[in-house]
């Protein structure tokens, strides 16, 4: 189980590094433009939706998919 979390952590860091140049301008846009201020809520809502279905997600088969 620890190796799964280690792999997930490494993947999260790598994805974070790839998106790092995009994130600060995006956050500035969210902060300054009222039309985009909901952007701060999107990660929180996404995490809540995943957490709410964690039991279903836990039992999904871990197989490759053509969808990505």
Image (cartoon, helix red, strand yellow):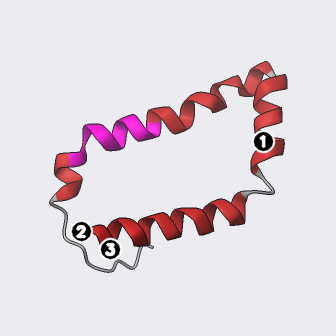
Task: State the SS at label 2.
Answer: loop
Disc 3 crowd rating (10 Å Cα; few below 14, some 14-19, many 20+) is few
Depicted 16 relative to depicted 25: above or below: below
Residue identifier under label 1: 26
Q: Is residue 64 above or below residue 25?
A: below
Distance CA(mark 1)–CA(mark 2): 34 Å
Please tell me whether mark 3 sits on a helix, a strand or a loop: helix
* Residue 18 x %, y %: 70, 66
Which residue in the rendered view is the most extreme toward the front? 2
Q: Is residue 62 found left or right of 11 in the rendered image?
A: left
Count of marks, rendered view: 3
User: Residue 45 location, x and y as percent?
Assistant: 46, 32
Which numbered disc covers residue 3?
A: 3
Q: Residue at x 78, y 25 (%)?
A: 31
Q: Residues within 10 Å of mark 2 (few under 14, many from 20)?
A: few
> Residue 1, labelled with which disc?
2
What segment is highlighted magenta in the picture?
A: 46-54
Foreground of the two, 25 or 35: 25
The location of residue 61, given as percent across then percent down, is 19, 70
Name the dominant secondary structure of the magenta segment.
helix
Which quarter of the rendered picture does the C terminus lie within? Answer: bottom left
| SS under mark 1 | helix
């Amino acid at each position: 189980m620890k190796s799964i979390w280690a792999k997930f952590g490494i993947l999260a860091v790598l994805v974070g590094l790839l998106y790092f140049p995009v994130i600060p301008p995006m956050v500035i846009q969210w902060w300054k433009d009222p039309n985009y201020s909901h952007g701060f809520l999107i990660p929180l809502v996404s995490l809540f939706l995943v957490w709410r279905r964690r039991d279903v997600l836990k039992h999904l088969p871990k197989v490759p998919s053509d969808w990505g």
